[in-house]
Amino acid sequence: MIRGLYIGASGMRAQEHRLDALSNNLANVDLNGYKRDTSVHKAFPELMIRRFDDNGEFRFPMGSVDTAPVVGKLGMGVEYNESFTVFEQGSLKVTENAYDLALDDEGFFTVDTPQGVRYTRNGSFWLGKEQILETKDGYPVMGENGIIKITKDHVSIDKLGRVWQQETLDADPELIDTIKVVGFARNRFLQKQGTSFWSENENSGPAKDLEGLDRPGVMQGFLEGSNVNPVTEMVNLIEVNRAYEANQKVITTQDSLLNRLISQAAKY
């Protein structure tokens, strides 16, 4: 019965982790470039149940316990394994804003922040007061040669990420820089930093510039939406609530049986 309490408690803890991931996904369903989280759990090692008592007589087999006949397996509950980000492509939305950018494949924009270089899929940029291409939080977007500064009225960005500017539409375009796009050996280990930023670590590997066929296309006038399906997440949320309640009922039942056992044993 004590084992049943622990198994039920482990199930509740597992559903709490799933609930955290699902609620965070739903809270960011409208955030550009957001990638959904998923929580992974694994079962504790199962116990093998073997029979040592036939016809009321206890018989311990000679040699190994493994020679006793197998009755079945006893589950020991679940444990939290990890939470990781699913980097599926989100849908592209047309905005026709010259400073809105989206990537049509794997990769990240590079942003300079006070905490160091960060990476994002959120291409909702704008031209700051000092005519620097920035995120909506005021952090400069990095080009291959540094900060991108736009000094003329007309701006175009091609699919290769090259930033061109013109004084007038009839003037010859001037190449400013190329949007810096990077990738990682293991995206799933990137650490979320809030406001749609990620940071690298030892598990993800260092950022590497994407070139040639590995480089995603840069889409001007588009934004990438989140890859969260709100209907699926709501269904999963209902499933989590029911699983949590079921584990809670297991604990309540085990506690009731344990209380009855102690009360009955006390009478004798």
Image (tube, rainbow, N blue to C red):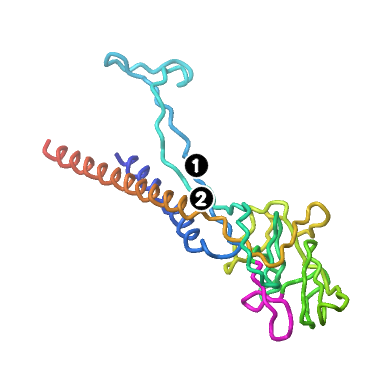
* Nearer-the-camera pick, 107 or 172: 172
Image disc number at residue 42: 1
Label 1: which secondary element: strand
Q: Which quadrant holds residue 182? A: bottom right
Q: Left or right of 98: which side holds 226?
A: left
The overriding secondary structure of the stretch rendered in magenta is loop
Give the amino acid at mark 2.
Answer: Ser
Give the answer, above or below, for where 192 lies relative to 9: below
Give the answer, above or below, for where 193 lies relative to 86: below
Q: Which residues are magenta?
A: 123-140
* Nearer-the-camera pick, 83 or 267: 83
Disc 2, disc 1: CB below 8 Å?
no
- Quarter of the image with the N terminus in it: top left
The residue wearing badge 2 is 39
Check the image and name the residue furthest to the front.
170
The magenta stretch spans residue 84: no
Q: Which quadrant holds residue 251? A: top left
| Residue under the point 74% across and 80% down | 132
* Nearer-the-camera pick, 182 or 160: 160
| Residue under the point 21% across and 44% down | 256
Q: Nearer the viewer, mark 2 or mark 1?
A: 2
| Residue under the point 83% across and 74% down | 176
| Residue under the point 59% across and 65% down | 32
How many badges with numbers are in the image? Answer: 2
* Nearer-the-camera pick, 128 or 259: 128
Give the amino acid at mark 1.
Answer: Lys
